[in-house]
Amino acid sequence: FPSHDTGDMLFEEEDYPAAIGMANKVLALGADNVDAANLTRAYLILSGSKGMIADQHGPFSELIQGTKVLPLLRKAQKISPDNAGVLFGLGSFYLLRLVQ
């Protein structure tokens, strides 16, 4: 079973493609086989990684990867609406949209 701790570690090491791969492995297991906390974390890792790739690789990446961030955060929010990571992610997303 892929661990969300591994995904967190890859994200912290800025290995965003690997973090995306790990999150996708968790999500591929499906909601019937993964608890809500791990599903939420996988969506957060996926959205955060895509956001970082979008930020670091210019306007085309921002268009391709950046537009996927909010839908992923919304999926995490649907699973765990009061999760601190979800709330932080949504707040950060909207704040960054205001300052750009």
Image (spheres, rainbow, N blue to C red):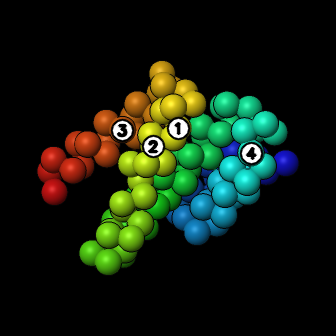
The tag earlier along the polypeptide, 1 or 4, is 4
The tag earlier along the polypeptide, 1 or 3, is 1
Query: What residue lies at 42% left-to-right and 58% top-to-bottom?
Result: 68
Disc 2 element? helix
The tag earlier along the polypeptide, 3 or 4, is 4
**What residue would you read off at disc 2?**
73
Query: What residue lies at 78% left-to-right and 49% top-to-bottom?
Result: 29
The tag earlier along the polypeptide, 2 or 3, is 2
Label 2: how many Cα within 10 Å (few below 14, some 14–19, many 20+): many
Question: In the image, is 22 to the left or to the right of 53?
Answer: right
Point out which mark residue 76 bears: 1
Which amino acid type is marked by label 3?
Leu
Give me the C-alpha separation between circle 3 and circle 4. 23 Å
Which amino acid type is marked by label 4?
Gly
Point out which mark residue 90 bears: 3
Marks 1,3: beta carbons within 8 A: no
Query: What residue lies at 27% left-to-right and 75% top-to-bottom?
Result: 59
Label 1: how many Cα within 10 Å (few below 14, some 14–19, many 20+): many
